[in-house]
Amino acid sequence: MKQIITNTYQMRINIVFLAIMLLLAACSKEDESKPGEVLKAEVGKPAPNFTLTDIDGKQWQLSSLRGKVVFINFWATWCPPCQEEIPSMQALYEGMADAPFQMLSILNNDRPDYARMLADKIGFTFPILMDPESTAAAQYGLTGVPETFIIDTQGVLREKFIGPRPWNSREAWMMIGQYLPPKK
């Protein structure tokens, strides 16, 4: 009988100990990131770095563009709103030719040959990067196309726009201008 009471008592202690351990584990702060986890882009924080190749074979690494304001636009040829904003993007790209500014368009779920045909047809000249594994799209938390991200000269994500915009508007120029370094 004494053995049964001792075993029951020990079992209760083990259950209480296990409950305390589970409670402590549930209340502990998890790591900021786990191995292999993709960190999502967040306005006000450093932009996730990527290395992608454009349709002409040139490799682009975001971190190598520090010192420039970087305009990243995710798009697709099958997306009518994307096609509608391309002329205003081209005008912005040409207008910023003498500024520390780099426009990158990232093709999402589309074929590079279609993008090249569209670029030739419409006449836009900014780089078209391929993201075949959708790595950059995942890093930036892409929800659809078009989506645009503005990164400042220090590599910090400053703006996120979902949907098309008139990129050659006064408002767009002023927004981008606030992130450019002062002219000397």
Image (cartoon, helix red, strand yellow):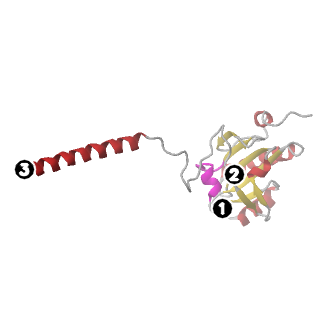
Magenta stretch: dominant secondary structure? loop
SS class, disc 1: loop
Check the image and name the residue furthest to the front: 2
SS class, disc 2: loop
Q: In terms of depth relative to the viewer, which is nearer, 95 or 15?
A: 15
Which residue in the structure is indicated by mark 2?
A: 49
Which residue in the structure is indicated by mark 1?
A: 110
Asked if 56 appears above or below 96 in the picture, the reply is below
Q: In terms of depth relative to the viewer, which is nearer, 167 or 34?
A: 34
Sequence order check: which comes first, mark 2 or mark 3?
Answer: 3
Check the image and name the residue furthest to the right: 184
| Residue 50 sits inside the magenta stretch | no
Circles 3 and 1 in contact, beta carbons < 8 Å: no
Q: Which residues are magenta?
A: 134-146
Q: Amino acid at mark 3?
A: Met
Q: How far apart are labels 1 and 2 at the CA level?
A: 22 Å
Give the class, few, some or many, for how many residues have Cα within 10 Å of label 3's Cα (few <14, many ≥20). Answer: few
Sequence order check: which comes first, mark 3 or mark 1?
Answer: 3
Residue shown at 67% from the left, 52% from the top: 80
Q: How far apart are labels 2 and 3 at the CA level?
A: 68 Å
Residue 77 position, x and y percent, is 69, 58
Sequence order check: which comes first, mark 1 or mark 2?
Answer: 2
Residue shown at 55% from the left, 48% from the top: 33
Which residue in the structure is indicated by mark 3?
A: 1
Q: Nearer the viewer, mark 3 or mark 1?
A: 3
Q: In terms of depth relative to the viewer, which is nearer, 169 or 183?
A: 183
Circles 2 and 3 in contact, beta carbons < 8 Å: no
Circles 1 and 2 in contact, beta carbons < 8 Å: no
